Amino acid sequence: MLINGENNYTLQAKKGEVIRFYITNSANTRPFNFTIAGAKMKLVGGDSGAYEKDQWVDAVTLGPSERAIIEVLFEKAGSYAFQNKTPDKTYEIGIIAVSEDSVASSYADSFAVLKTHNEAIKSIDPFRAYFSKESDKKIKLSIELNGDMQKMMGVGSAGGGHMMADGTMMGGNMMEAEPKDGIEWENSMQMMSVIPDTSMVKWKISDQASGKENMDIDWKFKVGDKVKIRITNDPKSMHPMQHPIHIHGQRFLVVKRNGIQNQNLVWKDTVLVQNGDTVELLVDMDNPGDWVIHCHIPEHMEAGMMSQFKVLNRI
Ligand SMILES: [Cu+2]
């Protein structure tokens, strides 16, 4: 795990210094739960600018392509660790060395205040009336294995698990590997990751209304449309795991997660849809052209997990 390309990233700071960090998860597959041990941390921004309001956080969870802006106060001298803290393991991925010299002008007083960001609130206001409308599009995330792959996995054989009519695995290794908290933090399903290629595995975005999948989905919108997209990540799929879903060319708000209204919004272009989760996005279709919506894990995208849509100019 690297920070800015280094496996021993070190940063120098001074006592009393407040540092603003722009964090991008540029990993291929791995989600990060990023934190700085022993320092006070404030979440101020996401993918595309400020949140409506600042909030104190212990850590930020980022899927591939997601971004966060945090501010951190280093009150005392000493060594602070950048960490990736998952439920089972804490990785140290860098160090901030804070010297005894006090910083010339400290922003500690300003840091102590949780601010409201009026610009962000104003940019979201025109969209609030659409938050509770019916979903315009409903998609499901899942996986399909071909016959050879199912045999390899022991599906249907006496020794392994067997497939239920609804596609659920019973018995075999698959159930044990199901992520505990909606996120597969480590590569726990080695066989799924090492053996298969795209001829054996298809990762799927399925449109619930048309029954179409992946690139056969070809939605059409008009500039100015405010489109509600509901995404469900099937917990009963053969490999239940999180998918960072990325939309090109437009911005969106994650208005609801599992039916609960989001109380602190930020403009985004990627949402980490955890295993079993349902998220509702309100997408601002303001950028005409041909675009894609896809999982930001390249292996999943290569194995199908991408759809297309058009945003047409109003005549
Ligand atoms: Cu994916």
Image: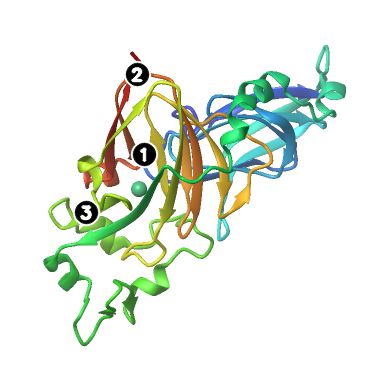
The amino acid pointed to by label 3 is: Lys
Q: Which mark is residue 84?
A: none
- The correct choice, above or below, for 109 with respect to 264 in the image is above
Q: Residues within 10 Å of mark 1 (few under 14, many from 20)?
A: many
Question: Between disc 2 and disc 1, whose residue precedes?
Answer: 2
Q: Indicate the secondary structure of the residue bearing disc 2.
A: loop
Q: Residue at x 20, y 62 (%)?
A: 145
- Furthest toward the bottom, the residue is 158
Give the quarter of the image for residue 83: top right
Residue bearing mark 3: 202
Residue 305 in the image: state x and y as whole percent: 28, 45
Q: Residue at x 36, y 53 (%)?
A: 140
The amino acid pointed to by label 1 is: His
Q: Indicate the secondary structure of the residue bearing disc 3.
A: strand
- Furthest toward the front, the residue is 315
Residue bearing mark 1: 296
Residue 308 is left or right of residue 5, and the answer is left
Residue 149 is left or right of residue 81, and the answer is left
Give the quarter of the image for residue 174: bottom left
Task: Answer yes or no: disc 1 within 8 Å of ligand 1.
Answer: yes
Residue 122 in the image: state x and y as whole percent: 67, 21
- Furthest toward the right, the residue is 109
Q: Residue at x 54, y 42 (%)?
A: 133
Using the numbered discs, state the Cα–Cα distance from disc 2 to disc 1 in whole angstroms.
22 Å
Q: Residue at x 62, y 26 (%)?
A: 124
Looking at the rendered image, the disc whose residue lies closer to the viewer, 3 or 2, is 2
The amino acid pointed to by label 2 is: Pro
Question: Between disc 3 and disc 1, whose residue precedes?
Answer: 3
Q: Residues within 10 Å of mark 2 (few under 14, many from 20)?
A: some
Looking at the rendered image, the disc whose residue lies closer to the viewer, 2 or 1, is 2
Q: Nearer the viewer, residue 220 or 53?
A: 220
Q: Indicate the secondary structure of the residue bearing disc 1.
A: loop
